[in-house]
Amino acid sequence: MVEGKIKRDFSRNLTRGAVSKGSAVATGALIGSVVPGIGNVIGGALGLAASALMKDDVDKVADTVESSVFEKVEYEFCCPKCGRTWSNTQKNQTYSQNKKNIESNVDKAVKIVQDNGSKVMKSFKDSLKKIKW
């Protein structure tokens, strides 16, 4: 049986690295703020150590973020018997769902800005009319 491995490019590795380091720093800052006198620098070092212990959990979070950010996943396969390699690209379902939510929220935000912009312009024009030139 052949198992596919995700083919990760620079941007995918960067995203995963940011999640890993970010969770380590957040854990360290939390340790530094909860334990008085330890400080955030020492807490950061402890956070790195804690993230190593929680690697599986951090990897799950990184997988979730990665599937939310990137539209497609390319898998690379290698036959253990003959050595033939091939790849297959699939769409991320999580990405499609998040894209719809983001587009909906952006549309709502644009409408709010347009509505408020119109109100501001009307108020500005009314203020200009009141000024004696």
Image (cartoon, rainbow, N blue to C red):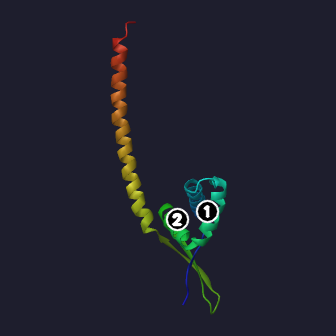
Q: Residue at x 62, y 65 (%)?
A: 13
Which residue is more in the foreground, 124 or 75?
A: 124
Residue of label 1: 47
Residue of label 2: 66
Q: Which SS class for mark 2?
A: helix
Going by the numbered disc 2, the residue's amino acid type is Glu
Residue 41 position within the rendered picture, expressed as x and y whole percent measured from the top left: 66, 54
Q: Which SS class for mark 1?
A: helix
Is residue 126 in view from this perspective?
Answer: yes
Could you tell whether 14 is left or right of 112 in the image?
Answer: right
Q: Is residue 99 above or below residue 1?
A: above
Residue 127 numbered tag: none
Residue 126 position within the rendered picture, expressed as x and y whole percent measured from the top left: 33, 18
Q: CA distance from mark 2 to mark 1?
A: 22 Å
Which residue is more in the foreground, 79 or 95?
A: 95
Q: Earlier in the sequence, mark 2 or mark 1?
A: 1
Question: In the picture, which quadrant includes the N terminus?
Answer: bottom right
Could you tell whether 96 is left or right of 70 in the image?
Answer: left
- In the picture as drawn, the residue positioned furthest to the front comes out as 37
Q: Residue at x 42, y 58 (%)?
A: 99
